Image (cartoon, grey):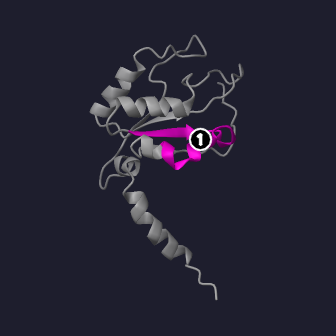
Amino acid sequence: MTVTRSSASRQQAVAPTIALHPGHQRLFAADKLTIGLILPLETHPDTPAPSMRNHIAMAQKADEYGIGALWMRDVPFYDPSYGDVGQVFEPLIYIATLAAATRSIALGTAGIVLPIREHFARPSFSRTNGARPVVGRPPGRVSPVRH
């Protein structure tokens, strides 16, 4: 005899685990509005790549000020028609670097190309980063709108 749990009971069983995740707690605090910032924390209108100067200090300030999360995009290849290269650094190494430099801010991917980022799926990645990483997965590449 096979016993299966209903979808609702599975969601109830998973919900307490997710609610205990530090990244989830930081982003979804009860009765609070949280704000996240997309990296890089600088503008660079005249060049496809940001300088990344003072990015660690800016991330630390965001953490101190109570910003909910820092989100990074995964841009593995430069496409001149797209216009930029994201935050320059490999996103998972960058998340680990920011986790070491900050205390409680959630660190997430606003979009990540998972087939080339196998190590992100490993449980040790989340454990070594204080369980703050949050995954955002896009539906696919969307061409930018140019006005």
Residue holding disc 1: 119
Q: Residue at x 34, y 36 (%)?
A: 67
Taking the magenta stretch, the answer to whether it contains residue 133 is no
- Position of residue 61 relative to residue 122, above or below, is above
- Position of residue 124 relative to residue 43, above or below, is below
Element assignment for label 1: helix
In-front residue for pair 122/14: 122
- Position of residue 98 relative to residue 127, above or below, is above
Amino acid type of the residue that numbered disc 1 sits on in the rendered structure: His
In-front residue for pair 96/16: 96
Taking the magenta stretch, the answer to whether it contains residue 121 is yes
Residue 113 seen in this snapshot: yes
Instruction: Tell which residue pokes out farthest to the bottom in this image.
Output: 1
Q: Please indicate whether residue 113 sits to the left or right of residue 41 in the image.
A: right
| Magenta range | 106-125
Q: Residue at x 33, y 40 (%)?
A: 104
Based on the displayed image, in which of its 4 quarters is residue 81 positioned? top right
Q: Residue at x 31, y 26 (%)?
A: 61
Q: Residue at x 36, y 40 (%)?
A: 68
Q: Residue 93 at what x, y percent from top left?
A: 52, 30
Q: Residue 4 at what x, y percent from top left?
A: 59, 80
Instruction: Tell which residue pokes out farthest to the left in this image.
Output: 64
**What is the number of callouts on the image?**
1
Q: Residue 10 at what x, y percent from top left?
A: 51, 72
